[in-house]
Every structure is written in structure tokens, then in C-alpha cells.
Amino acid sequence: MKKITNILITAFFICMIFIFGILVMITPPKETSYIENRSLAPPPPLEKEQFINGGFMQDFEAFFTDQFPWRDKWLKAYLSIQSSLGKTFLLGYYVSDDDWITTEPDHSFPKEELTESAQKVNGLHQLLDNEGIDFYYVNTPHKVSNMQFLLPDYIERGAYDTVRTHFLSSLDPQVPKLDLLDAFNQTYSDKEMKELFFKTDHHWNARGAFEGYKKMVEWLGDQRESLPARPEKLHLENYEERCLPDKKLIGSFNRQLYLSVDTEEKKCAYYPEDNAYDQFIVEKNGEVVDAENIYGRAFEQTEEEVYYSTLHTGDYRELKITNPALEEEGEHVLIIKDSYVNALTFMLAQQFYETTYYDQRHNKDRALMDYIDQHEFDLVIMMYNDPSSDGAIYEYEKPLEKP
């Protein structure tokens, strides 16, 4: 009887593998994973050399894994089982009882790499100073490092404060710097901080971005007298809050968990009541485009899913916003940025005549300093969410990749 049972079980699994194999082969392969936001393995080429060197089986394994039928549903079910078993971290993420997602703490402290990164910032500051261009460094508050209180008490906290403190203290004293993470911690309680970030995404929300904008502009106004005083732009009552309650936010952290966390998020953006954004001239990668196609696309689209990038702006190689209202008194600013600035792009543009956003990650074929020399900027602001040991984002003398 036992032998028959073993045969039946073996036959069942062979049949399942055979059936799933057929499904994989007859189902049109997907090019990308909507949830994971990455490219999926394509069908392996049927080439003689691939069979000889073993590459075919390796490529087929990747293809089979990526294109497995109902893969996302299987993984989502797996995560649910792991959660019910009381696992603290799921695929490197922690989900609190009230559906807040954060990452497993990072305890690394790459001191030498951080020092080298800071020295690159110092070098850029010195070079700009020699050319009469003012430079400022702004550290924006990353959700993970700013909200470690989301983790259980028994979990050792990450080294984020040590990393940030070392990097900022390694900047020359002459470099004007603003640590928005420290400013947030001094201003808001843990409960208030939850009003400033998304639960299932790693970015701040519209309210958090506005608070960061306000603190940054106030600080910048203290640093330079030439910045036009526009105090009315720093009061939330002068903005209309537009929200999308019936749409679903696809948070970056939740995507990594196969959208297994089902919770409500506040999906909003702020628009000035004086309709200042309507007057902006917007250029993406050198071409004039409609502002609605850059900022707040989710409000124009019919899709039910909302992303941080469609509530605000996405990552672009180069984005320039001209504000005609400040043509006579405004300045030309270059902002070197990451995705945290995407929620600030139009708000900050209210303070300058020309605001250019430059993303190093999408400009690997050209040197930052060459780009600066080709334009006439009055000031340059570098804005990153927490220091990185990856010195590439601070590189300014040479392209990150050979053209």
C-alpha cells in the first residue's frame, strides 16, 4: 500500500510539473513584472552553443521561474503563510500590525566610502565657489531611517544616524547644509510623523513634502538675501488639496511584497489656489511639454492604480520649469536630486525664475560639471535622501559611464 501511495504522489508531482511546463510554454511571456517593477527573463534561444556550454538550462531555469503560471499569486500566498507563522521579516521587510511597511535594519557603516563621498561634495562646492556659484546641501528624510520606531522594541536599530552624522560632519564647514531628517525629528512626534509618509511606499506623502519644502525655503531664505520673499507660498491654507480616494496606491515597498498588504492610503497632491502652476513653462529633456503630463498625472489618467510618481512627478534626465512671475527678480537654480524631490518639483519652482532638476542616475553619459558649465546657474542645490556610500551619485568631474 505504501509503495502504491508513493507511486501516486510521484505521478501527481510529475503531472503537475508537466502541466505547468506546458502552461509556461504556451502562455505568451511577460516582458516586465508589474508588481516587482523589473524585467522578466525571456525564452532562452535555441542555439547549439547554448546547449553545449550549459547556458540553455541556466536561462531556461530563470525563464521558468519568472514566467511560472500565477507566480504573483503563489508568492502572495507564501507571504501570507509566513506572516501567519509569526515571521518578523518577509523578504527583508517588516509589516506592523497597523500595516506600516519598513525594511529590515541596515547595520553597516562604510566609513571610508562615506568619507570619499563627502570629499566629492566638498570638491564640487570648491569648484562652484571658484566660479561664483553658490552651493547648498540638503538631506531629505528617508522613511526607513526616519521612522525606526515602527520596528518592534526587540529589533536592533540600524546605523542610519551614525552614517548620516559622519557624512554631514565630513562636509567642509563652508558648505551650507540642512538636515531635514533632524529638523523633522525636532518638530514632530512619532504619531505626527505618520501623517507625513506613506504606509506602503518609501517616500514622504504630499503633506510631508510640503513640510520639507517649507523648512527648506525658510532656511534658504536665511542663507541668501537674493531669494525673493514669498511667505504666502509657505502656508498650507493657500493650497488646494486634491485627493484620489477611490484609487489604489501601489507603494514601492508593497510591490516587493506582491501587494500583500491591503490598507488605505491618503493619495493627495497640493495645488496653489492662485493657479501658479498653470503659468509654468515646463521642459522635459529639452522639449516643452504640458504641465499636466509631468505633475499629477494620476488626476488626469483613468487607471485605478496610483503611484508616487503619478501623484507628483517621475524621474527624468532633465526637467526645467520656468516661472514667468519671477522673471525680473528670480534666480536660476540647478537641483541635483533623487526621487524624494519629485514631490517638491512644482512647489520649489515657485521660488525661482528657472528651476532645473538633474538626476545623476539618468545622466551617466555626461559629467555634471560639464553640464553646469554649459548653463548659467546662480546656485546649485544637492538634495539626497540620506547619505549613500555609492560615490557615483556625488560624481561631478567625469561621466558615470563611457558614452
Image (tube, rainbow, N blue to C red):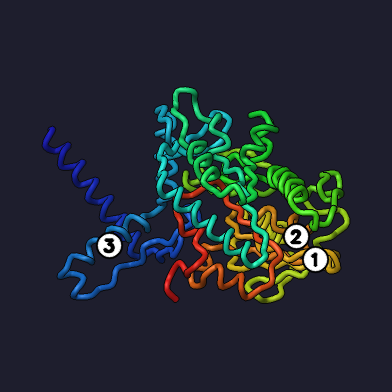
Give the mark nearest the N terminus, 1 or 2.
1
Q: Which mark is residue 323?
A: 1
Q: Nearer the viewer, mark 2 or mark 3?
A: 2
Mark 1 nearby-residue class (10 Å; few <14, some 14–19, many ≥20): many
Q: Nearer the viewer, mark 3 or mark 1?
A: 1
User: Which of the pair 391/65 is nearer the observer?
Assistant: 391
Q: Where is residue 263 in the image (x, y as percent from the top left)?
A: 60, 38
Would you say 6 lies left or right of 391 here?
Answer: left
User: Which of the pair 219/129 is nearer the observer?
Assistant: 129
Q: Is residue 49 above or below residue 278?
A: below
Q: What residue type is labelled 3?
A: Phe
Q: In this view, does 384 lie above or below 26?
A: above
Q: Name the residue under label 2.
A: 349
Give the mark nearest the N terminus, 2 or 3.
3
Q: Name the residue under label 3.
A: 60
Rounded to the nearest angstrom, the CA distance separating label 2 from label 3 is 49 Å
Q: Position of residue 191 (x, y in %)?
A: 66, 29
Task: State how many labels appear.
Answer: 3
**Which residue is at a point 80% across and 61% down the rendered structure image?**
277
